[in-house]
Amino acid sequence: MVKRGGTMGPGMWSLFILFALSLWSNSQAFTKNPILSRIRRAPEASGETKKCSYTFLVPEQKITGPICAARGYSTDKDRVTRLDVASVRDLLSKQRREMETLKLVVDVDGNLVNEMKLLRKESRNMNSRVTQLYMQLLHEIIRKRDNSLELAQLETRILNATTESLRLASRYRELEARYSALAAVVNNQSVLIGALEERCMQAYSRREEHPPMGPPLVQVVPENIPVSVPRLTNEIQTEHGRGFARERGSRSGPSPTGETLEVQKPPERNFSAEGPFRDCLEAQEAGHSTSGMYLIKPDEAERPIQAWCEQNMDNGGWTVIQSRRDGSVNFFRNWDSYKSGFGNIDGEYWLGLEGIYRLGRQGDYKLQVELEDWMGKKVYAQYNSFHLEPESEGYRLRLGIYQGNAGDSLTSHNGKQFTTLDRDKDAFSGNCAHFHKGGWWYNACGQANLNGVWYTGGVYRSKFQDGIFWADYGGGFYSMKAVRMMIRPID
């Protein structure tokens, strides 16, 4: 071995050995190469002993020391053998298997990473859902708290309303007691006035040979007289079932106001604050199909008035101008009361002559009188036209043709002016309102007295025919249980 400026490192020797083995294993390729063949034949030309010689082409290296060359095999301990090559190959295969194992591990780790990403995404979604549920729960808690506050306010309002109703009930009981006391006073006064009248009549009869007589009694004998009359009576029954005797009806004279004999009560039925309407037919056409109290303002009227609208009978649209049912309202009144109206709209009342006159001026109206006897039977009398003349004409009555099953007891009053105790406009020498205890379109005095005294039981005892009678049904001494007068525009 010849050294030239140094030695080769172990790495370089390994590369050199691998390259030599590769050349050795492919020695046949060198024999086919013309260049290598010429190199191999060079010793034969010189006549030397035939020996194998090889020339190795080594990559140029940076020589830093002497180069050593030697012939023959080296016995150095760093010589590469087949076992070394096999071990290297085993090592390479082992490393390859380890690399494949590492690749599988890397694949598994990648799947785990993807699964972790999915879990993180699901975790974020779950957190978002939990936050949403928390917000919903918080909103529900706030809403329930608000509901509890509203419930507390409602309970407070109910307690206040209950207290107010109790106060009103106490007030109503006080008014009932006052009403009873006033009724007793009126009863005593009626008896006293009756006695005074008798004494006056006796005193007058002593001075006059022929004292003034009352109006002629009704001579009509009706075909259908209500039967099974319980008793003869002159009692007036209130709506609470209390009764007090009146000698020959109410003789206390006209009441100056409507509060002397009646208690104003709150309405018990339907009431509509809409309107006002021209009449009840217009209220029905506006969609109000329930019977009840409505605001009515006829044309040319200064202010609206309350009236009861009957929407359940004969196609509805009837304006009730008079109602009698229980004797709770005194109808023995003066001219101003009958002009403006009085009573309770949901009970007994008179609409008012001025209001009836204004209603009739709006168009052509018809009148229906509904009568109910004490057996519960109802009959009616209908007139195909109805209106009143103005106050300057004494609210003169104008009627049309009659039809019905109650008998015609009102035509004899057609064309007559209205009479009260302080406005005598009848055809009798005396005052029919005085004898019949009401206000009406009296003749002399007439066949009907629907504003007279309300007697209970039907047939009554009285010196004069002062009950609520309809001569053609029951006669002059049969007082009806209930009466209604209604008007409606002609179809």
Image: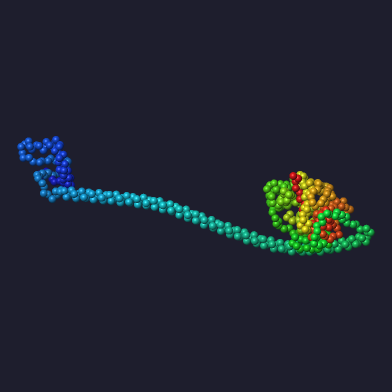
**Is 242 located above or below residue 473 in the figure?**
below
The answer to which of 8 and 244 lies nearer the viewer is 244
Residue 275 location (% of width, % of height) = 69, 48
The answer to whether residue 83 is left or right of residue 372 is left
Residue at the spot x=39%, y=51% of the render? 118
Image quarter of the N terminus: top left
Count of numbered badges drawn on the protein: 0
Please say whether residue 329 is visible from this viewpoint. Answer: no
Query: In this orientation, does residue 14 appear?
Result: yes
Compared with 35, 140 (above or below) is: below
Question: Which colour scheme appears in the figure?
Answer: rainbow
Q: Residue at x 14, y 49 (%)?
A: 78
| Residue drawn at (36%, 50%) of the image | 114
Q: Nearer the viewer, residue 66 or 416?
A: 416
Q: Nearer the viewer, residue 377 or 395?
A: 377
**Residue 180 appears in which quarter of the rendering?**
bottom right
**In the image, residue 32 above or below residue 99:** above
Residue found at the very far right of the displayed protein: 209
Quarter that holds the C terminus: top right
User: Observer-nearest residue: 314 or 118?
Assistant: 314
Where residue 16 sits in the image (x, y, percent)? 16, 44
Residue drawn at the location 78% of the way across and 63% of the way down:
243
**Image coords of residue 158 (percent x, y):** 62, 60
